[in-house]
Image (tube, rainbow, N blue to C red):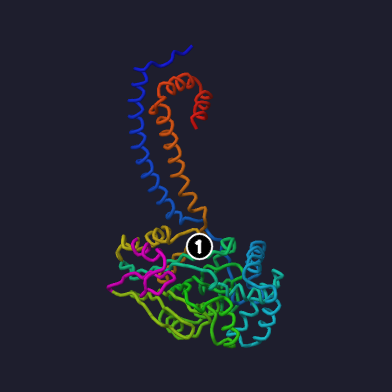
Amino acid sequence: MTRPLSYSHCGSVLRASRFVIGCCSFFFLLITAVTSQAVERAQWRNHSGKKLDTFDISLDDPPVSRWKEVMEARIDEFHTTMDWIVDHVVPPEMLPKLTTALDLLGDIWPKPEYRQEIAGIARVTGREEGLVLLLNLVYELSAGCTSIVAQDSVDGSVWHGRNLDFDIPHLQDLAVNVRFFLSKDRKEENRVLVYEGTTYAGYIGLLTGVKPGAFSLSQDQRDTEHGSVWENLLEFLLSKGKARAYPFLFRDIFETAYNYNEAIQVLRDTPTIAPAYAILAGTQPGEGAVISRDREKAVDVWTLSEQEWFLVETNDDHWKPPKDNRREAAKTNMRRYHPSNMNADALWWVMNQHPTLNELTTYTAVMNAQQGFYDAVLQNEETQSRIGSVTVTIMFHYTFLGYLFSHCCCSQNAFDRCSFLSSSVSSVEGAATATTKFV
């Protein structure tokens, strides 16, 4: 039979417990620091999320069939998202009217082939064409984003980072990378990459993309009093196609603009159906801009300069105080770098720091038009849970250990608890039983 501990033994245990708690505190802080740094490095080196599936789209193919492969690969996810939009955005009486409105547009579309692409998506999925059109205008409903352009002084190129945040459920499941090809003789072996970017299955435009050797482009929502999805749709209809929807405008720019200067002119002067920020980066030093737009024209063009080697745009006018902490957090993280060490890894790190990366972020992209570089990854809550789980696990073990010692050795009933503990730890099962009783 195990002898109970004496009071002198208990005093020794008390002193030993203080020492152990002190050691535990030290090692907890050390492990937490090392682990958090390791997780942080792994987070941005692994680009935080998983690689997006990539689909090739031939601009030589008939428009009605261009998105067939994409939609067949994401048809279940597409229906889930569209059901949510129907339940939360579209009044039931509006559904038939959307298709009627689409038919009334006739040939006033800026490019009739976009109408055909939407028709092709509707055909594959069995959804109304008007509803697919609404998906292409829904960006202004509830989006948030962060875009950054930054000068690289080593090779003179401009890096462009982008996080796109959306609070529509399951939208991450629709995110895909797309590469648009074209050939002069319509022979596949002679096709060339025109531009590439990230979009959502069913959304025929690009809110993020790069034209290698020319420019990169992203769009951020601009919060105004008159920018709802229904106002955007009404503007699109009443303007008879003269006011451009961003998914179609960006496609046009990627296909027709040859350089940064041509792109910025179109973005500055073309009427659009919604206010927005267009973030543009070129291939030469200083070619980086944030174009703040209302529906008619640009209200401000903010460019890189010697005084400002990087620009951060979220969803507020840069000349006004921000409404949340994303802008200032991104600027603080960017100041850890310099044009001489700005590169893909540095920008990945910035884009993957909270709150720039948050629970609403659907994907992160980093691009460089001069280098022809484009990389994008999926983001969702799993990224945050992976980071938090390590710290939570360590915290749990440390808290439990502190709880065990404080309740076993440091309370008024220390002697009784120490006696109980000494008689219980003779086996793992006994220790587990003792722990359960303390808890």
The residue shown at (56%, 83%) is 235
Extreme residue in the left direction: 307
Residue 318 shown in magenta: yes
The residue shown at (64%, 76%) is 118
Q: Which percent across, then down, holds residue 221?
A: 48, 73
Is 359 on the left-hand or right-hand side of 68?
Answer: left
Q: Which percent across, then down, holds residue 95?
A: 69, 75
Q: Quadrant of residue 175?
A: bottom right
Span colored in magenta = 306-332
Helix, strand or loop at label 1? It is strand
Up/down of 177 relative to 439, above or below: below
Up/down of 418 relative to 335, above or below: above
The residue shown at (66%, 87%) is 106
Q: Which percent across, then down, holds residue 61?
A: 63, 76
From the viewer's side, name the closer residue of 410 and 360.
Answer: 410
Q: Residues within 10 Å of mark 1 (few under 14, many from 20)?
A: many
Reading the image, the residue beneath label 1 is 363
Three-letter code for the amino acid on which mark 1 is drawn: Tyr
Is 309 on the left-hand or right-hand side of 127?
Answer: left
The residue shown at (27%, 73%) is 307
Extreme residue in the top direction: 1
Extreme residue in the front direction: 412
Q: Which percent across, then down, holds residue 77?
A: 64, 62
Tally of numbered discs? 1
Residue 166 shown in magenta: no
Q: Quadrant of residue 80?
A: bottom right
